[in-house]
Image (cartoon, coloured by chain):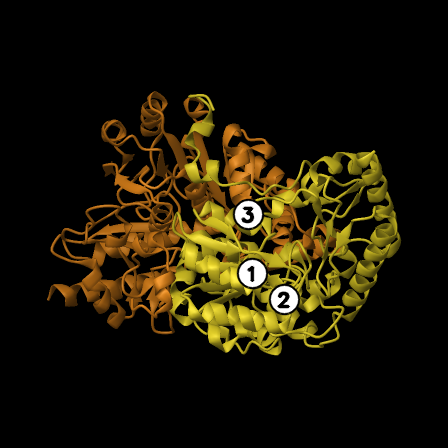
Chain colours: A yellow, B orange
Amino acid sequence: VTDQSPERFVSRRMRTSRPARLGKYGPWLRGPNIISFAGGLPDPAFFDAVGLREAYDHVLDTMPERALQYARGEGEPELREQAARVLTEARFPTAPQELVITSGSQQGISLIGTALIDPGDVVLVESPTYMAAVRAFGLAGARLVPVETDLDGIRPDDLETKIIRHRPKLIYLIPTFQNPTGITVPAARRSQIAAVLERHDVLLVEDDPYSELRFHGEPLPPLAADPRLQDKSIMLSTLSKVVAPGLRIGWLRVPAGLRPTFVAAKQTTDFHTSAIDQLAAAAYMDRRMRDPRRLDPVRDAYRNRSDAMIDTLEKLMPAGTRMTHPEGGMFVWVGLPDQLDSDLLLDHAVECGVTFLPGSGFYAEDPVRSNLRLSFCTYPVGTIEEGVRRLAAAVERAAG
Amino acid sequence: VTDQSPERFVSRRMRTSRPARLGKYGPWLRGPNIISFAGGLPDPAFFDAVGLREAYDHVLDTMPERALQYARGEGEPELREQAARVLTEARFPTAPQELVITSGSQQGISLIGTALIDPGDVVLVESPTYMAAVRAFGLAGARLVPVETDLDGIRPDDLETKIIRHRPKLIYLIPTFQNPTGITVPAARRSQIAAVLERHDVLLVEDDPYSELRFHGEPLPPLAADPRLQDKSIMLSTLSKVVAPGLRIGWLRVPAGLRPTFVAAKQTTDFHTSAIDQLAAAAYMDRRMRDPRRLDPVRDAYRNRSDAMIDTLEKLMPAGTRMTHPEGGMFVWVGLPDQLDSDLLLDHAVECGVTFLPGSGFYAEDPVRSNLRLSFCTYPVGTIEEGVRRLAAAVERAAG
């Protein structure tokens, strides 16, 4: 940065906060000869463009003045009502006034940074965790501390140790079909975590973008719904994975004492989320999202794709490769034999016509470089099998 | 805040940054018996719901997979192209890649806070200035310092004095139809301001929501377009006042060296602005916003309303009342006789069936309590005249 470069104006927090590490290519490398397992992009074949068009038309026909005018920061009543219904059906009884509408979950995370985080505050996270959350908390000045994590989620004993040692302001968890690992915290572990959090002055932030995409096993209530965490939990939800990410519609469930703060943070950030998108989303949820089986085709497809990915990985990857067996969501987490570095593997993979996200970007500390994240949601089974074949070929090249 | 209240989790910057002071009632008090001059709400009679519905339908019919999928942080190419055309036509030659799409200007201001402001940085502002900008910069930790302002805008001599004394990082100006005063900086003053800024290491942020709403006089090129400010100016634009605020669509024109920082800040904040809104806005701008006379009906109406408001104020308000005579935009700034306090007047006004925003909320320092802001854009002439009659009655009560 020279004296005359405009970069001299950039804030310190922007310069020093860790950018999301997405590997050399990020999730954007695409092309006719590339199979991308990198992005968490829903399969557009399941976008209901017809139903959404109907919803937008309904809104512009029947309430154009509301859809096009300034609106209130907390969000449109109809949408908060629909969102409250969805949370209540997921066993987290919720009233509309407990919700603040956000422009997707990422904005929810970012608002938590604005509303709650002071420079130096500690945020506990899973290890690995969702990298865009790390960036948003980091930009607010948080110090991220990982809690030891096994195949059932964070370990309650280490959680308590870290709380006592670091006095965190909040803990950020994705208990269901985690990003990047795909693992789900079982009921018993949820209860143990809630017991620890009840004993300490820590706020739980539960990020829950995937729970409706369950294709194995039985649904669990959100961890944030545990009665011991009343007034100590915030929950983030989004339409990105179950309707469409392009809409940027999500919501925060916030304890009553924090709601005015979050509404003020939202208003200062962008006044309110697009009123037309909010009203169209509400109309769509009212008309098209009441049938509990409506997501069955997506779940069936994702189950088949996840199964195909895991089967093919087990068949073709070298001995010593481990992987998670998600019960839903979008991701399989693969542990390569220790000597392999997934950041280095990526170049070979791209040459072989496949991409993924290296694991190193998902750690607040001590990245495990032999891990990588694969998304199984974007392609049909045949393409997934071909992509895994290419990945196996890349591993062979990298090892050889 | 007790030990057990969830407010104990709120960040210091949220607690200490000054909330936008909107008077006792804010812009939201409405009702059949209230004429509100408080909000800067465009008249919904000018919303083109038919044209916008056509644009949304076009997007959902022809490119649903793009409109509904994740998109890039900097914004959709079609929208950046339309926005670049509009800026170029306004005599600020701009290429699409110089722009970052935002969810309205408020998000643009907030992103400037994230990308550029460190706690303690000084931001120079007009006196009075736009209160929501004050809040957004304040939340980023800025110290706001007013520059002496007369009926032609900030005074260049005081600007230089304040720059030397406070070493500000940036200066935030609304040179055209300012909020709250409605005044426009003339060409000669613009040039003097640019000359001062050229000599010092300060970034200009020009907020320009209203310039297309000119109903008297000749258009001026933006201050930010002055060639002396190349690489030292950021410009904020929005569709809120000329299409519809409900869409939340705006853009930032940013020097090349700052663009990656702004894209990263945008991605961390909410990934991207609603893709469907962006693509619909682009289609709408392409189809419906090429005729330079398309805003003539709005301009004619706002001219009549502004004239009616000023005439009626001059007729009915007490001796010693002064007011601005805007050439466009939405606001008249009224200076009551010094002994009147507009915060106290507001209660009387509401009793008389009219609201406004007290002036005290618009100052970074030393509020002038006898000023107030009236918006003339929302109602037809007859209602405006009636509203001013009620205001005059309230002044009589307050004085008596």
Q: Secondary structure at mark 2?
A: loop
- The mark lying in front, picked from 2 and 1, is 2
Q: CA distance from mark 2 to mark 1?
A: 10 Å
Instruction: Write the residue at 47% across / 42% down.
Output: B212
User: Which chain does the numbered disc 2 sit on?
Assistant: A
Q: Is residue B99 left or right of residue B203?
A: right
Q: Nearer the viewer, residue B188 or A68?
A: A68
Q: Position of residue B189 (x, y in %)?
A: 31, 29
Q: Is residue B194 left or right of residue B213?
A: left
Q: Amino acid at mark 2?
A: Val
Residue A210 lies in quadrant? bottom right
Q: CA distance from mark 1 to mark 3?
A: 13 Å
Q: Residues within 10 Å of mark 3 (few under 14, many from 20)?
A: many
In the rendered view of the protein, which quadrant contains the N terminus of chain B?
bottom left
Are the two marked residues, 2 and 3, in contact with CB atoms closer than 8 angstroms? no
Instruction: Write the residue at 47% across / 57% down.
Output: A162
Are the two marked residues, 2 and 1, in contact with CB atoms closer than 8 angstroms? yes
Residue bearing mark 3? A364
Q: Are marks 2 and 3 on the same chain?
A: yes
Q: Nearer the viewer, residue B91 or A317?
A: A317
Q: Is residue B102 visible?
A: no
Residue bearing mark 2? A185
Q: Residues within 10 Å of mark 1 (few under 14, many from 20)?
A: many
Disc 2 or 1, which lies upstream in sequence? 1
**Rendered view: B320 above or below A220:** above
Disc 2 or 3, which lies upstream in sequence? 2
Residue bearing mark 1? A173
User: Which chain does the numbered disc 1 sit on?
Assistant: A
**Rendered view: A189 above or below A346:** below
Callout count: 3
